[in-house]
Image (cartoon, rainbow, N blue to C red):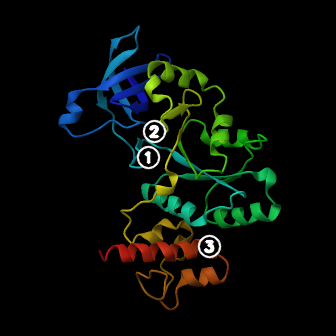
Amino acid sequence: MRGKIIKGIAGFYYVNVVESGLYECKARGVFRKEKTKPLVGDEVEMEVLDETEKTGNITAVLPRKNALVRPAVANVDQALVVFAVTEPEPHFNLLNRFLVMMEQKEIPTVLCFNKEDIATKAQTEELAEIYQVCGYPVVFTSATEGIHIEKVKRLLAGKTTVIAGPSGVGKSSLINRLQPTVQMETGDISRKIARGKHTTRHSELIAIDGESYIMDTPGFSSLYAGDVEKEELKYYFREFAPFEGRCRFQGCMHLSEPDCAVKQAVDHGKIHKIRYRDYQEMYAELKNRKKY
């Protein structure tokens, strides 16, 4: 039998099998011998031990298309990153770091700016200008007013999506809007493992429907791909791509070099100054890190 791990806690894995339900499973000893560990989001093969009690053993993990370390999750189709348009103002550096990590992992990202109902037109236009130019899908929502929630649902349909964002931006309210039918799923898990229902540190997939899953990601502020090489960083700012190869020097890092096409694009407003500033800052951090 095949299913998807939607939660892992205290050595137990909760495997959702479409049309059969949720099974509480342990991982076979072979995983310990091979020093591998099943992750939330893994597609697995399992043997049923007790159909009435819905218990089983995971016998194999199917090949992953990707995996994140923080949060520990596999087979992500996309990320939905949530910030507020205002109250609080967007933390651009944090947002751009997350985008770098997703670019490195080749995980598509949708940007959701919440609290549209209390924002000015100028605020929403600035955010659209910065990120739509980069090629990221941008959606403005109000979780409290229910504005554009259906649009977000369409973007999530048929996919496993990690939802990330700092505190205070209305992420929990948005998640509650997205999964009104999820009470059955969370109820099953809560009954099976009361010890886990108040735990927010563990990765957990929430089924919106049979084919669509979302996962909240605690600890958003610590998200950053620490294994990025400084020479690679420019490739993770996707708006730089049209100007690559047009600089005077081959291998231009787009910093202090003369006749740099990227810097010229910044000067002409084709690349936003906020994005370029954060590129400079991240590059300096990566350069300094290598000294130690």
What is the spatial separation of the Cα atoms under label 2 and label 1, in whole angstroms? 7 Å
Give coordinates of residue 22: x percent, y percent.
Answer: 46, 20
Instruction: Specify whether residue 18 is in view.
Output: no
> Relative to residue 257, is residue 39 drawn left or right?
left
Q: Which mark is residue 71?
A: 1
Give coordinates of residue 241: x percent, y percent.
Answer: 52, 71
2 and 1 marks in contact (CB < 8 Å):
yes
Q: Residue at x 63, y 32 (%)?
A: 179
Dot 1 surroundings within 10 Å: few (below 14), some, or many (20 or more)? many
Q: Secondary structure at mark 3?
A: helix
Dot 3 surroundings within 10 Å: few (below 14), some, or many (20 or more)? few
> Relative to residue 228, is residue 153 drawn left or right?
right
Location of mark 3 (residue): 274
Q: Residue at x 74, y 51 (%)?
A: 115
Dot 2 surroundings within 10 Å: few (below 14), some, or many (20 or more)? many
Label whose residue precedes the other's in the sequence (2 or 1): 1
Q: Which amino acid type is shown beneath numbered disc 1? A: Pro
What is the spatial separation of the Cα atoms under label 3 and label 2, in whole angstroms? 32 Å
Location of mark 2 (residue): 203
Q: Secondary structure at mark 2?
A: loop
Instruction: Specify whether residue 137 is in view.
Output: yes
Residue farthest to the top? Answer: 52
3 and 2 marks in contact (CB < 8 Å):
no
Q: Is residue 56 above or below residue 84?
A: above
Give coordinates of residue 7: x percent, y percent.
Answer: 44, 31
Give coordinates of residue 79: x percent, y percent.
Answer: 54, 48
Q: Secondary structure at mark 1?
A: loop
Q: Residue at x 51, y 58 (%)?
A: 98
